[in-house]
Image (spheres, grey):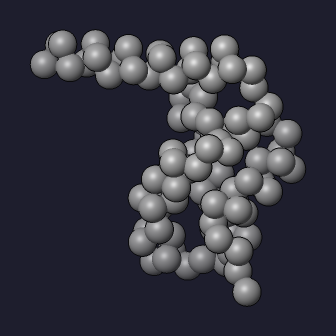
């Protein structure tokens, strides 16, 4: 039986010993779970949502993802704050 994609993502990141850009992580997970192109298209949005909500992961610069426990609190907070500031700046421009 195939593992949940989010658990496979955790394993992939543990094995890489570093962060991965979202699409590379997604493709690695899909390859391990032997998903078809159609299945990949159906699951990409849910996978991104799962990554965002799962406390084991952190989004770093340039939409790269890593295991949160590898990073100090200050690094994680700084990455998240810079995303918020960028979003606020974009809203002010509109």
Task: Between residue 21 and residue 82, name the one nearer to us.
Answer: 82
**Figure check: 81 above or below 67:** above
Q: Is residue 1 visible?
A: yes
Which residue is farthest bottom? Answer: 1
Horizontally, is 70 left or right of 40 in the view? right
**Figure check: 16 above or below 86:** below
Q: Which residue is rendered at x = 42% and y = 58% of the image? A: 45
Q: Where residue 44 sits: x, y (%)? A: 47, 61
Which residue is farthest left? Answer: 94
Horizontally, is 45 left or right of 94 in the view? right
Task: Between residue 73 and residue 80, name the one nearer to us.
Answer: 73
Task: Between residue 63 and residue 1, name the one nearer to us.
Answer: 1
Quadrant of the snapshot with the C terminus:
top left
Task: Between residue 67 and residue 25, name the one nearer to us.
Answer: 67
Q: Which residue is rendered at x = 70% and y = 80% of the image? A: 2
Q: Is residue 19 visible?
A: no
Q: Where residue 61 sits: x, y (%)? A: 57, 25
Q: Quadrant of residue 34?
A: bottom right
How many discs appear? 0
**Figure check: 53 above or below 59:** below
Quadrant of the snapshot with the N terminus:
bottom right
Q: Which residue is rendered at x = 57% and y = 15% of the image? A: 78
Q: Where residue 79 sits: x, y (%)? A: 56, 20
Q: Where residue 24 sits: x, y (%)? A: 64, 49
**Figure check: 34 above or below 86:** below
Q: Quadrant of residue 65?
A: top right
């Amino acid at each position: 039986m195939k593992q949940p994609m989010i658990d496979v993502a955790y394993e992939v990141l543990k094995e890489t010993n570093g962060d991965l850009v979202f699409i590379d992580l997604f493709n690695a997970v899909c390859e391990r779970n032997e998903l078809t192109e159609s299945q990949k298209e159906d699951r990409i949005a849910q996978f991104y949502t799962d990554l965002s909500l799962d406390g084991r992961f952190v989004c770093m610069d340039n939409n790269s993802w890593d295991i949160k426990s590898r990073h100090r609190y200050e690094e994680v907070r700084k990455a998240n704050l810079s995303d918020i500031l960028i979003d606020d700046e974009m809203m002010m421009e509109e």
